Image (cartoon, rainbow, N blue to C red):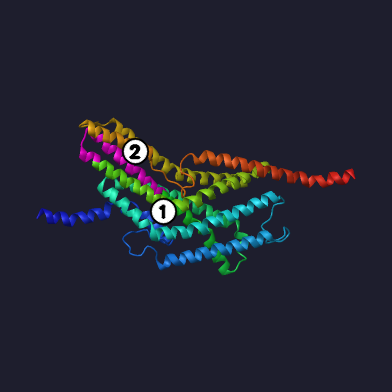
Amino acid sequence: MARTIVCKVTPVVSARRDISWCFQPIFVWMRVLGIDLNPKNHKAISIYGFLMLLVGTGAQFDNASVISWKLSLPKNDTNALNISTSKTNNWNIEVDYFNHICLMVLVSPTVFYVARNQWQLLWRLIVDFDSNYCQLDHNQLRKKLSIGVVTLLLEISATLHALYLVFPDFRREFIMRKFLTVFAFFAKILPISSLLWYCYVAWISSLFYEAIQRDIDRTCKVRKEDLRRWKCSLVLAGEVVDGINECFGLILLISVTHFVVDFIVNTFYLVNNVTITNQFRLVIALANMLRKLTMLWFITCTPTEILQKASNVAYSLRKVNCLGMDLQNQVSFLALDILQSLPRISALGYFDINFELLPKMIGTTLTYVIILYQFHSSEKFDVNQPMELTTSI
C-alpha cells in the first residue's frame, strides 16, 4: 500500500519543484521570442519561431540597406545620417551601426540552431546531475534566476530610447517601413536574451561544483563508495561544461567581439562628447557603457566562478581523511587531475571567457581610442591648414 502512495505522489513533486521549474521564466520568455527550450515539447523549433527568424533577419538586412543608403547621401540632404563634419566620427558611426547589425544577424540563426540541435543533450545532463548528485534549493534558485529580468528591462529601455531618437523621421515612413524598423530595433533583445540564457546555465554548473565540495566537506572518513560517487559527479559536471562550450561557443565569440568593438566606439563617443561639452549625450553614452560593462561582467563572472569552485573541490579533496593508504593515493590523484584539467568556457577555443578579458579589453579600447582621437584632431588641424596656406601665398 505504501509503495502505491509513493508512486502517485513523487511525479507531482518533481513536476512542481524540479530544475525545470526554476528555468520556467527564461523558457517562457525565449518561447515568446520564437525559441522553444522546453524539453517536454517534441519540436525544438516551431513554425512561429521559424517565421520570427525569417522576419527578424529580413528586417535586419532591410535596416542595414536603408542605413547604408542614408550614410552615402551628401551632408546637406535631409535624409543623410552623416550629420558630423568629422570623417572620423562618421566612420565611427558606420562601425557602430554595422557592429550592431552583425550581432543580430549572426547570433539569431545560431541561437535557433543551438535550440534545435545541441540544447536538449545539455539540458538532460543538467537534469541528471540535479536529480542524482545534488539537491539544490529550487525556491531560492528561481528567485535568484529572476534577477536576470533586470537585464532585459534595461535592454528594452535602451531600445525604446533609440526609437525615440529616430521618432521624427519615423513618423514620415510607410506602415511597412515602420513595422520593419520596430522589428529591427527590438530584434537585439534576442541576442541579449541568449546571453542571459548562457549565464543561467553557466551559473548552474558552478553550483554543481559547489555541491560536490559540500559533499566532500561533510564526509569524515572517505570510503570507496564516496570516491566513486565523486568521480561520477565530476565527470558529469565536466560534461555539462563541455556542453556549454558546444552550445554557446559561437554565440560567445560573436558577442564578446561585438562588446569589444562597441566599447571602442562608445568610448570615442564619450571622449568626443566631453570635448564638445554636450551633457545630455555624455550621460547617454556613459549609461550605455555602464550597461554593456555590467553585461560583460556577468558573462565573464560565471566561468570564473566555475574555475574557482572546481579548484575548491581539489583543495577539499586534499584535506579529507581516507581509510587506507591506497585510497588516499587515489584521492590525491583525483585532486591533481582536477587542478590539471580545470573546466573552462571558451569562445570556440579562440580565447577563454573569464575576468582576464576585462583588462585586455580595456587596453585594446584605450589603444584604438587614442588612435581615433589622433585622427579626429588631425582633421581639425587640416580644416585650418588651407587658410594658413592662403595667407602665406
Q: How far across and down, in percent of the image, does residue 35 sit? A: 41, 60
Amino acid type, label 1: Cys
Mark 2 residue crowding within 10 angstroms, few (<14) / some (14–19) / many (20+): few
Q: Which residues are magenta?
A: 199-227
Q: Nearer the viewer, residue 155 or 39?
A: 39
* Picture coordinates of residue 308, whole percent (x, y): 39, 37
Residues 168 and 251: in front is 251
For marks 2 and 1, the one nearer the N-term is 1
**Labelled disc at residue 74:** none
Is residue 152 visible in this depiction of the protein? no
Whether residue 231 can be seen here: yes
Of residue 341 and residue 99, the one placed in the foreground of this image is 341
User: What residue does disc 1 label?
Assistant: 247
- Residue in the image at 46% along x and 58% along y: 110
The residue positioned 49% from the left and 66% from the top of the image is 54
Q: Residue at x 28, y 37 (%)?
A: 214
Instruction: Residue lying at the far left in this picture: please name it.
Output: 1
From the viewer's side, name the closer residue of 138 and 305: 305
Q: Quadrant of the N terminus?
A: bottom left
**Quarter of the image where the C terminus is located:** top right
- Looking at the rendered structure, the secondary structure element under dot 2 is helix
Does residue 198 appear left or right of residue 278 in this picture?
Answer: left
Query: Compared with residue 45, is residue 1 higher up or lower down, i.e. above or below?
Result: above
- State the residue position of label 2: 337
Q: For mark 1, does the 10 Å Cα neighbourhood hold few (<14), some (14 to 19), or many (20 or more) residues?
A: many
Q: CA distance from mark 2 to mark 1?
A: 25 Å
Inspect the image, locate mark 2, and give the three-letter code of the amino acid beneath it.
Asp
Residue 204 drawn in magenta: yes
Q: Quadrant of residue 317?
A: top left
Counting from the top left corner in percent of width and height, residue 386 is at 83, 47
Q: Is residue 182 left or right of residue 383?
A: left
